[in-house]
Amino acid sequence: MMGLFNKKGDEYEALIKYLYQTLSEDFEEEIKVFSKYKIKGKSEVEHEIDVYYEFEKNQIIHKVIFECKDWNKRVSKEKLLTLKAIIDDIPNSVGVIVSKNGLQEGAEKFAKFNGIKIITGDKINILGGKILPHKLKNVLPDQYTKAEPFWAIMEKNQKNNSTGNFSKIQDRIILFISKKEAEEVLKMDKIVNAHVVGINKKHLSILIKYSEMWNWKIAIKNFFMDTIVDVSPEELKDNFYNI
């Protein structure tokens, strides 16, 4: 069966594009983000860029060129040499190498010396962690949201508004069937700057989506018991969202 992407690398590029496109929504400048973007350099040679990011500031078009490598091995210096040649050929551009498993020592030194930004697997996960609060900001659950069917504990700010960050217990986002039990856990575990919120289907769909992308651990607390059960995004979708 043909998937959305032709190969795994395409999916990785699409993920990087999505991350930066979403984060760019907070900037005043109009920012354009493309994947598999074709652009001609000073040499008149056409380059295909994995992910291309462009914005105008002080009447100058600034360009960011992403080379994305979803490899099981670290990126070699030779790949950085190719990226550097593309950057040199495209005016007002900077380069970013995105590698799931990092760079070889020589490649890392070369990148740093030439001002090429390095983003590795851990940093990609940190970026992803910024996305959920961003996407939830207009649909944040609160203490008045009707649970469909879960409750959760979420951080709150000084105005008692939800921040979009779930409070984790045992490194997991815990979903509660009972609001009362969630409030008891909040009190017993002395979780500060947080409150119990209802999770409706819209919130659940967002949570499922990002747990799939970032491998977040989610668990459901057993009703009237002091135990939790780990649950996958697929199980949440099949048993609670698609009903």
Image (cartoon, helix red, strand yellow):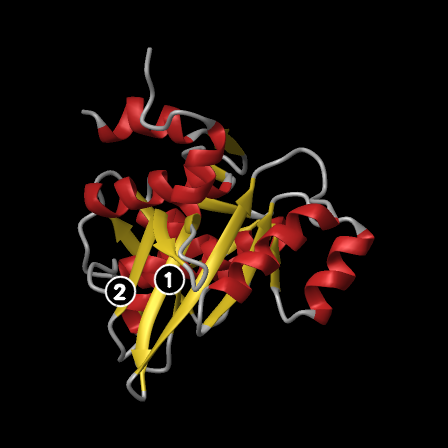
Q: Which residue is mark 1?
A: 53
Residue 40 pos. (x, y %): 37, 56
Q: Which residue is mark 2?
A: 137
Indicate left or right for 113 with 142 as reference. Answer: right
How far apart are the alpha carbons under marks 1 and 2? Answer: 24 Å
Image point (28%, 85%), residue name: 59
Image point (52%, 40%), residue name: 217
Residue 105 pos. (x, y %): 82, 53
Q: Quadrant of the C terminus?
A: top left
Q: Residue furthest top?
A: 1
N-term mark: 1 or 2: 1
Q: Quadrant of the N terminus?
A: top left
Residue 155 pos. (x, y %): 41, 66
Residue 70 pos. (x, y %): 57, 38
- Asked which secondary structure carries label 2, the reply is loop
Indicate left or right for 157 with 218 as reference. Answer: left
Indicate left or right for 234 with 200 as reference. Answer: right
Q: In the figure, residue 63 lies in which quadrant?
A: bottom left
Mark 1: which amino acid?
A: Tyr
Res 203 seen here: yes
| Foreground label between 1 and 2 | 1
- Asked which secondary structure carries label 1, the reply is strand
Query: In the depicted view, which residue is nearer to us: 6 or 198?
Result: 6
Q: In the figure, residue 190 lies in which quadrant?
A: bottom right
Mark 2: which amino acid?
A: Lys
Query: In the depicted view, which residue is nearer to us: 46 or 129?
Result: 46
